[in-house]
Image (spheres, rainbow, N blue to C red):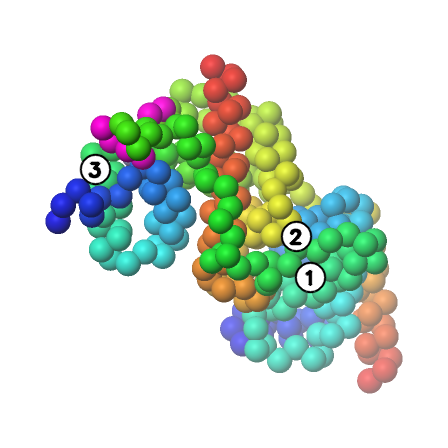
């Protein structure tokens, strides 16, 4: 167990209210976003997060530190969120069943953006991407830009949404995500790749329209 | 090393994540870098991908409502009372 986790666990076990408040403040946003991937409703997601924290308290005496406190917390959330989603008969993203080698997927960029096989430089850019520097909305990260990114993420398949949320919004490492979702490094990367590619495409369309 | 060794733009766009995640062999990474050194379109594509990641990272506004937080603090008090009374 890391000394930081050890310190927090000891504080919680001794009933230290501030330690709990700090932890809630630090992780609730991440937990809430991950819960939302499964339950797709803000209020239900909030209930799932509350249930998760209570679950943590009730099992804190059993925590042995085989994983980090954070991973443990996220695992509790996954269990709560998945069973809640199941209860409401939603499909759950089975990232663990995803097999990158058997999933052709869509290309990140439409094929007609590249030169045809008959051209001088087949498969090189015919319509190359243009720089986004000049776009003030993107630079300032306007609320409209954020709304576009959010909308793009909301339309992703669940298992891609799960991975991009954990990696690019919550800032978990690839190792943390693989452990949490019990997926291989390759599958994690492919899901992330698909997700990022679609968000980029949505942004490109948005920038193109704004021009 | 002939032209067959070179990566196409179409391949580059599917390799960006491996590149950004440092999940490439040294030779593949070298080929990728070599392509970038002569292809402005792919340099811009890579920039766009980094920008996409940066923008996605700004979607952090979700948090628990104050009501939920205060509920949690009362739950903590209940838990503490039970935990201390049972020992
Ligand atoms: Zn290129």
Q: Measure how far apart labels 2 and 1 are at the Cα level.
A: 8 Å
Query: CA separation, marks 1 and 3?
Result: 44 Å
With respect to residue B59, does A173 lie above or below?
Answer: below
* Kind of element beneath mark 1: helix
Residue A123 lies in the magenta-colored region: yes
Where does residue B4 sit, x and y in percent of width and height?
20, 45
Nearest to the observer: residue A126 or residue A10: A126
Please say if A196 is above or below A119.
below
* Residue holding disc 1: A78
Is residue A161 found inside the magenta-colored segment of the image? no
For ligand 1, tell me if the residue under mark 2 lies within 8 Å. Answer: no
Callout 3: CB less than 8 Å from ligand 1: no
In this rendering, the count of numbered labels is: 3
The verdict on label 1 being within 8 Å of ligand 1 is no
Residue A34, numbered circle: 2
Extreme residue in the front direction: A118
Tell me which residue sits at (39%, 44%) in the image. B14
Query: Element type at marker 3?
Result: helix
Question: Chain for mark 1?
Answer: A
The residue under the point 72% across, 64% down is A79
Contact flag, marks 2 and 1 (Cβ < 8 Å) = yes
* Magenta segment boundaries in residue numbering: A120-127
Instruction: Report crowding for label 2: few under 14, some 14 to 19, many 20 or more residues within 10 A (C-alpha).
Output: many
Q: Which mark is residue B37?
A: 3
Q: CA distance from mark 3 to mark 2?
A: 39 Å
Q: Are marks 1 and 3 on the same chain?
A: no
């Amino acid at each position: 167990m890391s000394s930081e986790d050890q310190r927090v666990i000891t504080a919680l076990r001794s009933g230290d209210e501030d330690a709990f408040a700090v932890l809630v403040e630090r992780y609730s946003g991440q937990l809430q976003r991950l819960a939302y991937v499964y339950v797709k409703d803000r209020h239900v997601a909030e209930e799932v997060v509350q249930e998760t924290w209570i679950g943590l308290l009730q099992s804190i005496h059993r925590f042995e530190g085989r994983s980090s406190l954070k991973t443990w917390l996220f695992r509790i959330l996954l269990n709560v969120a998945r069973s809640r989603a199941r209860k409401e008969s939603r499909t759950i993203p089975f990232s663990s069943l995803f097999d990158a080698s058997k999933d052709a997927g869509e290309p990140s960029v439409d094929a007609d953006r590249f030169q045809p096989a008959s051209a001088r430089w087949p498969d090189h850019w015919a319509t190359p991407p243009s720089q986004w520097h000049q776009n003030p909305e993107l630079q300032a990260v306007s609320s409209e830009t954020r709304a576009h990114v959010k909308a793009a993420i909301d339309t992703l398949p669940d298992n891609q949404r799960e991975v991009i949320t954990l990696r690019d919004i919550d800032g978990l490492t690839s190792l943390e995500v693989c452990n949490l979702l019990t997926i291989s490094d390759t599958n994690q990367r492919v899901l992330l790749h698909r997700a990022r590619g679609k968000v980029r495409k949505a942004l490109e369309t948005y920038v193109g329209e704004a021009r | 090393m002939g032209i067959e060794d070179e990566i196409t733009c179409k391949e580059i766009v599917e390799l960006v994540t491996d590149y950004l995640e440092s999940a490439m062999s040294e030779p593949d990474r070298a080929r990728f870098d070599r392509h970038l050194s002569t292809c402005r379109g792919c340099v811009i594509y890579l920039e766009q991908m980094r920008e996409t990641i940066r923008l996605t990272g700004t979607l952090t506004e979700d948090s628990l409502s104050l009501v939920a937080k205060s509920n949690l603090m009362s739950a903590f008090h209940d838990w503490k009372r039970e935990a201390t009374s049972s020992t």
